[in-house]
Image: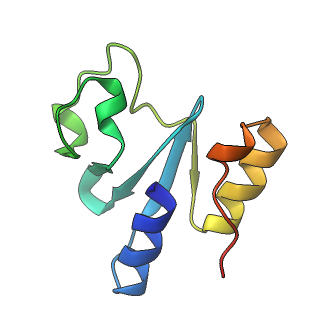
Amino acid sequence: ASAHLFRELTAAGYKARICANDQHCWVEMPFALVLDITATQFGKDRVLIAHRSELDNTAGQWTADYSFCTVQDLRAWQIKSGWRSFQIVAPAS
């Protein structure tokens, strides 16, 4: 889902990067804007759109260990890191 959002944003001309940590991905844009369309898995009741300074990283959900400028780089890292196959981003069509 985050890879799809990233593709749509960059195709529309926005600067963005995909961030990841321990089996979780989200998108960040300039000025520390965090976009997470899968945030409900972490107790949020909706899509997360927040400035990085607003996040309580109590559980570290939005602490980026890695960031990627292409979906292909994200996919290669997911495969190398042993992500479950159903969670690995599909190759670009």
Horizontal placement of 80 versus 86: left or right? Answer: right
- Quadrant containing the N terminus is bottom left
Q: Nearer the viewer, residue 64 or 37?
A: 37
Horizontal placement of 76 versus 45: left or right? Answer: right
- Residue 61 vs 71, above or below: the answer is above
- Residue 35 vs 57, above or below: the answer is below
> Residue drawn at (18%, 41%), measured in percent from left and top?
46
> Residue drawn at (22%, 46%), measured in percent from left and top?
47
Spot occupied by residue 39 in the image (x, y as percentages of width and height): 31, 37
Image mark count? 0
Horizontal placement of 55 versus 21: left or right? Answer: left
Spot occupied by residue 21 in the image (x, y as percentages of width and height): 56, 34
Horizontal placement of 28 versus 55: left or right? Answer: right
- Quadrant containing the C terminus is bottom right
Q: Nearer the viewer, residue 60 or 78?
A: 78
> Residue drawn at (59%, 33%), measured in percent from left and top?
23
Q: Residue furthest right?
A: 80
Q: Nearer the viewer, residue 23 or 13?
A: 23
- Residue 74 vs 86, above or below: the answer is below
Scheme of image coloration: rainbow
Q: Residue furthest front?
A: 86
Q: Residue furthest bottom?
A: 12
Find residue 22 and report its image quarter.
top right
